Amino acid sequence: MKLIPCPHCGNRAQAEFVYERTADSVVPLDAEPDAAVAALFARANPRGVEEEIWRHTYGCGSWMLIRRDRVSHAIEWVKPLGPEALP
């Protein structure tokens, strides 16, 4: 089983996390509907390293930005997102 390092809970099983989207597919609130649909549902899924947004849904509930290689699934780093990320 793959372990993901949660910034708050430490290493946890991947089954506790939910993949949300790539970091570049965040859609502004004032985006046109066609642009929003394309950004959210028409993914390119390229090989290589990409930043993704994940949530520790079945754990502490925190959001995080994960830099991960899509071929080897190796995680380079994890950063917290949201209010809990502020010092």
Image (spheres, rainbow, N blue to C red):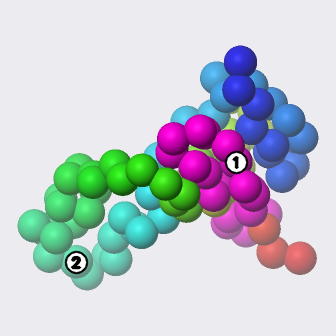
Q: Secondary structure at mark 1?
A: strand
Q: Quadrant of residue 77?
A: bottom right
**Of 52 and 71, which appears nearest the observer?**
71
**Of 6 and 87, which appears nearest the observer?**
6
Looking at this rendering, what residue extends furthest in the left direction?
Answer: 34
| Residue drawn at the location 51% of the way across and 45% of the way down | 70
| Residue drawn at the location 32% of the way across and 76% of the way down | 29
Image coordinates for residue 63, horizontal then vertical, percent: 65, 53
Q: Amino acid at mark 1?
A: Ile
Question: Is residue 73 visible in the rendered structure shown here?
Answer: yes
Q: Quadrant of residue 73?
A: top right
Image coordinates for residue 76, horizontal then vertical, percent: 73, 55
Q: Which residue is mark 2?
A: 31
Task: Look at the picture and state if 38 lies above or below 59.
Answer: below
- Density class for disc 2 (Cα within 10 Å; few <14, some 14-19, many ≥20) is few
Q: Judge left or right: residue 37 versus residue 80.
A: left
Residue 62's disc number: none
Q: Amino acid at mark 2?
A: Ala
State the quadrant of the C terminus: bottom right
Q: Judge left or right: residue 85 versus residue 35.
A: right
Q: Which residues are magenta?
A: 66-84
Residue 75's disc number: 1
Task: Look at the picture and state if 75 lies above or below 72.
Answer: below
**Of 44 and 41, which appears nearest the observer?**
44
| Residue drawn at the location 74% of the way across and 38% of the way down | 4
Question: Is residue 16 visible in the rendered structure shown here?
Answer: no
Task: Look at the picture and state if 2 lies above or below 77.
Answer: above
Looking at this rendering, what residue extends furthest in the bottom direction?
Answer: 30
Image coordinates for residue 2, horizontal then vertical, percent: 71, 26
Q: Is residue 63 magenta?
A: no
Q: How many marks?
A: 2
